[in-house]
Image (cartoon, rainbow, N blue to C red):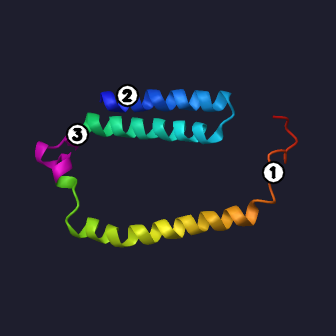
Amino acid sequence: MWLATAIVAGGATALVVGARRRREALHFLGSALVIVGLVGGAFAALFPEIQHSTLDVRYSMTARTSAADAHGPALALIWWPIALVATIGYALLNLRAYASKVGPDADGAKP
């Protein structure tokens, strides 16, 4: 829990500093860290019983009963690199296609 709290605090600090200094990458990283810290803290707080059943304890969803079998992670090792390459390729395609069409002063706002 303390690790998640530290990640949220660090992310919030990076978010504020990035916004004040107009550093978009730091601002983005800070917001991503806040989300990761909040989700990680929620998972740490819920472990091992993810969802408690009001009907009977044996119907509760735990980390052990919710885990995937060996086939799922093995399949993910195959499709994940393919999806990563496709995602990076799509991002580069968009970057090249729209890089000259939009600039920082496109809306007429002063920095």
Would you name the residue on which mark 2 appears? 5
Label whose residue precedes the other's in the sequence (2 or 3): 2
Quadrant placement of the N terminus: top left
- Between residues 44 and 82, which one lies in front from this camera angle? 82
Q: Which residues are magenta?
A: 48-64
SS state under label 1: loop
Q: Earlier in the sequence, mark 3 or mark 1?
A: 3
Q: Which mark is residue 61?
A: none
Q: Secondary structure at mark 2?
A: helix
Is 21 within the magenta? no
- Asked whether disc 1 touches disc 2, contact meaning CB atoms under 8 Å apart, the reply is no
- Asked if the residue at tag 3 contacts the one at tag 2, i.e. Cβ–Cβ closer than 8 Å, the answer is no
Res. 103 mark? 1
Q: Where does residue 104 sit, x and y in percent of width and height? A: 80, 46
Q: Is residue 75 left or right of residue 86?
A: left
Task: Please indicate whether residue 52 sits to the left or right of residue 2 in the image.
Answer: left
Q: Residue at x 81, y 51 (%)?
A: 103
Residue 50 falls inside the magenta stretch: yes
Q: Distance between the Cα atoms at labels 1 and 2?
A: 37 Å
Q: As displayed, is residue 59 above or below residue 20?
A: below
Q: Is residue 20 left or right of residue 101?
A: left
Q: Quadrant of the C terminus?
A: top right
> The disc labelled 2 sits on which kind of residue?
Thr
Q: CA distance from mark 2 to mark 3?
A: 16 Å
State which mark lies toward you, 2 or 3.
2
The crowding category of the residue bearing disc 1, from other C-alpha atoms within 10 Å (few below 14, some 14 to 19, many at least 20), is few
Question: Could you tell me the amino acid type at mark 3?
Answer: Phe
Q: How many marks?
A: 3
Q: Please tell me whether residue 74 is drawn above or below residue 58 in the rendered image.
A: below
Q: Residue beneath label 3, please?
A: 47
